[in-house]
Image: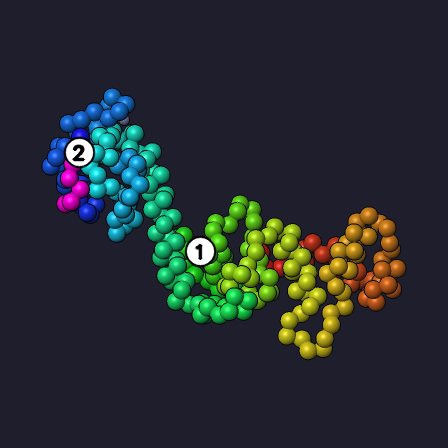
């Protein structure tokens, strides 16, 4: 069966064309044998188009199959998911772009929209509020893998430069938090007392009982309570922002 493509440039025209040339779908049977409910595009057209609302359609009317409700529902769910994913991304990209001034590839790009008390930019994404740097990652780099967080390599919470964003585990994030706490930002009196490497060593020694609190205190030049704090600071680490 062949049909002219000329007049079917829009989704609506295709729908009308189908009714006119092939009749109501209900006059046909679905592939499963049930009475068909509607014409469903089979997604086989390499040059398919998209309607304003993101629906994929083909101008080639032969690519539509009479489909019953239950056969169409599965396909519709998939299509709806695709549409939502595409729509959210489009809208978010637009909104996102309004509040970002892109700088150089290695510079921080501060978020110019809402910034919450926790220091992170925020905007709506995927139907809920999300942190701006996470949205930046999803727009620019792709979905965030399950169980992963998005971390800043620049330790600048309002930065949304995708080049400064990495996925990480909650453990990585805890390390970041330690580092932040040991190198407090905005302090002018210089060096923090412990490096991240030292913190890891302290925690290892503590865990393996290979060095006493006192000995580490002497060696690293910090109080024993500081050693204890660093070594057992699970709850303290938990206070770090989980990005
Ligand atoms: Zn069916
Ligand atoms: Zn940055």
Identify the main secondary structure in magenta: loop
Q: Is residue 74 left or right of residue 24?
A: right
- Residue 125 image position (x, y, % from top left): 41, 55
The residue under label 2 is: 2
Can the viewer see residue 117? Answer: no
Q: Which image quadrant for residue 61?
A: top left
Front one among 99 and 5 = 5
At x 26% / y 37%, what residue is drawn?
A: 41
Residue lying farthest bottom?
188
The number of callouts visible is 2
Answer few, some or many: residues within 10 Å of disc 2's Cα (few below 14, many 20 plus, some between 14 and 19).
few
- The answer for how far apart the CA atoms under marks 1 and 2 are is 40 Å
Front one among 173 and 44 = 44
- Residue 160 image position (x, y, % from top left): 50, 63
Front one among 178 and 49 = 49
Q: Is residue 158 left or right of residue 125?
A: right
Q: What span is in magenta?
A: 2-7
Q: Is residue 200 left or right of residue 68?
A: right
Is residue 236 magenta-colored? no
Mark 1 residue element: helix
N-terminal of the pair, mark 1 or mark 2, is 2
- Residue 115 image position (x, y, % from top left): 48, 67
Is residue 3 magenta-colored? yes
At x 36% / y 50%, what residue is drawn?
A: 86
The residue under label 1 is: 139
């Amino acid at each position: 069966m062949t049909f002219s493509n000329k007049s079917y440039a829009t989704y609506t025209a295709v729908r009308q064309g189908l009714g006119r040339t092939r009749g109501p779908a209900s006059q046909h049977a679905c592939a499963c044998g049930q009475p068909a409910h509607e014409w469903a595009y089979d997604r086989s057209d390499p040059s398919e188009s998209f309607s304003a609302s993101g629906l994929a359609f083909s101008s080639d009317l032969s690519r539509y199959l009479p489909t019953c409700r239950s056969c169409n529902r599965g396909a519709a769910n998939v299509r709806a998911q695709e549409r939502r994913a595409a729509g959210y991304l489009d809208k978010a990209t637009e909104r996102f772009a309004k509040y970002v001034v892109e700088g150089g590839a290695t510079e921080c790009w501060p978020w110019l929209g809402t910034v919450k008390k926790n220091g992170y930019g925020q905007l709506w994404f995927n139907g809920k509020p999300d942190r701006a740097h996470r949205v930046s990652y999803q727009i620019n780099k792709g979905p965030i893998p399950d169980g992963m967080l998005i971390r800043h390599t620049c330790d600048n919470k309002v930065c949304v430069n995708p080049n400064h964003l990495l996925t990480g585990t909650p453990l990585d994030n805890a390390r970041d938090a330690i580092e932040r706490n040991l190198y407090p930002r905005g302090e002018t009196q210089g060096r923090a007392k412990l490096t991240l490497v030292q913190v890891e060593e302290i925690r290892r020694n503590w865990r393996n009982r290979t060095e006493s609190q006192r000995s580490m205190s002497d060696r690293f030049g910090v109080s024993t309570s500081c050693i204890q704090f660093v070594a057992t600071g699970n709850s303290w680490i938990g206070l770090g922002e989980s990005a």
